[in-house]
């Protein structure tokens, strides 16, 4: 983690002269900052940022690395503050993930304390009216309303119910420091996150379910048989392990594959062939179209990816990250409810899974409500 005074000028990057103009009358200035634990936290903030802009807010962004690359690409006109991420790494095996997370726990706590001090400095300097944090535990303040976005109120653990209760208490200890909590999920039996977002006990602060939140739209294009889209995501080294496993099998696939590696800051681009096309990253409109054209999408069982696929009503084959209890629970929940076809990485065989997916009884829930628009409108009214 970088050692620097929070708010040091070298951390601050602006795309416009907006900071020189000061706050605009009647326009709340809102800081949006997603976690860097995979790309999903940033991509699911994209529709939230669009809606804030549509409702006449001054939006500022914060992050670093791949998160910064994605948000700058989507919103080049918005001011950006560099905020170091948590920089989590997974183990090479699923069994070693718990140990890897325990070893990194002190660094995570340090990062949370750093971002809390960082926010105090930025509030004094830029006079934000509110903060929206996607899973960044330190971005709370008693000075302004602060929203915490998460789909994971309950945390699954391989060590049993006692550890899950302890983890939930720890989770709520941080969440309750915010003004309110927004949960991107459906309410009722068709919930995408299941027990993760609908636990028996909720945080003490107001909780709002804001429906499926996705940067994509369902578009009418011709679906092409024997065309796959592969979307990689998640921390290393598991991202690369999964990538290599898929490439070894895809080279034998008799069809077309668009392979999005999920590495927006990478300089190296893998060479494409006539049938296997590699992209480090694609802007949302291009990826939206490629997904719509595909027969199946193959990806991790990351929650933001799940919301994107449900939004566009696309059939998918999802492989949870080994040892990541959240994704393993999601995979079981999604398969049981016929939302996605899921298989463990150690059992993955491309041809067999494609054949199984073709006969799988997909029943993808419909979306399209106005909950996000309504939630943001009411939030702005409360600011007023």
Image (tube, rainbow, N blue to C red):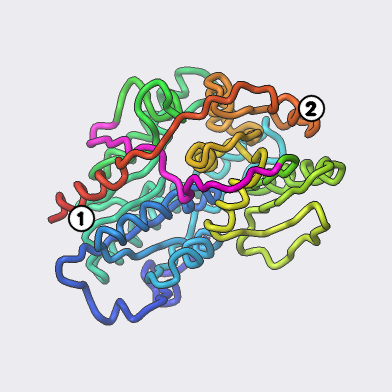
Q: State the image coordinates of residue 300 (x, y, percent, origin top left).
A: 62, 39
State the image quarter where residue 346 is shown: top right
- Does 351 appear in magenta? no
Q: Is residue 373 left or right of residue 61?
A: left
- Foreground mark, 1 or 2, reads 2
Asked if disc 1 and disc 2 are in contact, CB closer than 8 Å, the reply is: no
Point out the stretch of residues depicted in magenta. Answer: 203-224
Find numbered disc 1 in the image and state the secondary structure of the residue it sits on.
loop
Q: Quadrant of the C terminus?
A: bottom left
Q: Earlier in the sequence, mark 1 or mark 2?
A: 1
Q: Which residue occupies 43% across, 66% down?
A: 75
State the image quarter where residue 65 is shown: bottom right
Disc 2 crowd, CA 10 A, few/some/many (<14, 14-19, 20+): few
User: Principal SS element in the magenta part?
Assistant: loop
Q: Nearer the viewer, residue 364 or 171?
A: 364
Q: Nearer the viewer, residue 32 or 380?
A: 380
The residue that mark 1 highlights is 144
Above or below — where is 283 with respect to 93? below
Q: Is residue 253 visible?
A: yes
Q: State the image coordinates of residue 368 (x, y, percent, origin top left).
A: 38, 39
Distance of mark 1 from mark 2, alpha carbons? Answer: 53 Å
Say which mark, if any, is on residue 352.
Answer: 2
């Amino acid at each position: 983690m970088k050692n620097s005074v929070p708010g040091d000028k070298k951390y601050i990057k602006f795309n416009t002269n907006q900071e020189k103009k000061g706050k605009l009358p009647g326009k709340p200035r809102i800081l949006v900052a997603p976690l860097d634990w995979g790309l999903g936290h940033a991509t699911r903030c994209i529709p939230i940022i669009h809606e804030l802009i549509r409702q006449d807010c001054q939006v500022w962004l914060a992050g670093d690395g791949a998160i910064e690359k994605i948000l700058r690409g989507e919103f080049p006109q918005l001011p950006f503050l560099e905020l170091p991420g948590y920089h989590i790494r997974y183990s090479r095996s699923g069994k070693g993930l718990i140990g890897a997370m325990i070893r990194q726990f002190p660094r995570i706590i340090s990062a949370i304390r750093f971002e809390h001090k960082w926010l105090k400095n930025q509030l004094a300097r830029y006079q934000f009216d509110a903060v929206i944090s996607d899973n960044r535990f330190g971005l709370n303040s008693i000075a302004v309303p602060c929203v915490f976005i998460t789909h994971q109120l309950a945390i699954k653990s391989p060590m049993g119910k006692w550890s899950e209760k302890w983890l939930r208490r720890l989770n709520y200890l941080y969440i309750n420091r915010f003004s309110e909590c927004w949960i991107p999920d459906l309410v009722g039996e068709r919930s995408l996150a299941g027990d993760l977002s609908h636990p028996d006990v909720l945080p003490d602060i107001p909780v709002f379910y804001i429906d499926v939140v996705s940067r994509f739209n369902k578009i009418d294009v011709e679906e092409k048989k024997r065309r796959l889209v592969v979307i990689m995501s998640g921390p290393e080294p598991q991202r690369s392990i999964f990538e290599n496993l898929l490439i070894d099998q895809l080279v034998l696939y008799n069809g077309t594959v668009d392979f999005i590696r999920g590495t927006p800051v990478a300089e190296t681009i893998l060479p494409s062939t006539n049938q296997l096309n590699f992209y480090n990253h694609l802007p949302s409109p291009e990826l939206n179209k490629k997904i719509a054209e595909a027969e199946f999408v193959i990806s991790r069982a990351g929650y933001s990816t799940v919301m994107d696929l449900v939004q566009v009503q696309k059939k998918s084959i999802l492989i949870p990250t080994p040892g990541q209890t959240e994704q393993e629970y999601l995979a079981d929940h999604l398969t049981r409810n016929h939302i996605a076809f899921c298989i463990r990485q150690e059992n993955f065989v491309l041809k067999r899974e494609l054949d199984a997916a073709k006969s799988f009884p997909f029943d993808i829930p419909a979306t399209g409500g106005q909950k996000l628009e309504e939630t943001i409108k009411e939030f702005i009214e409360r600011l007023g």
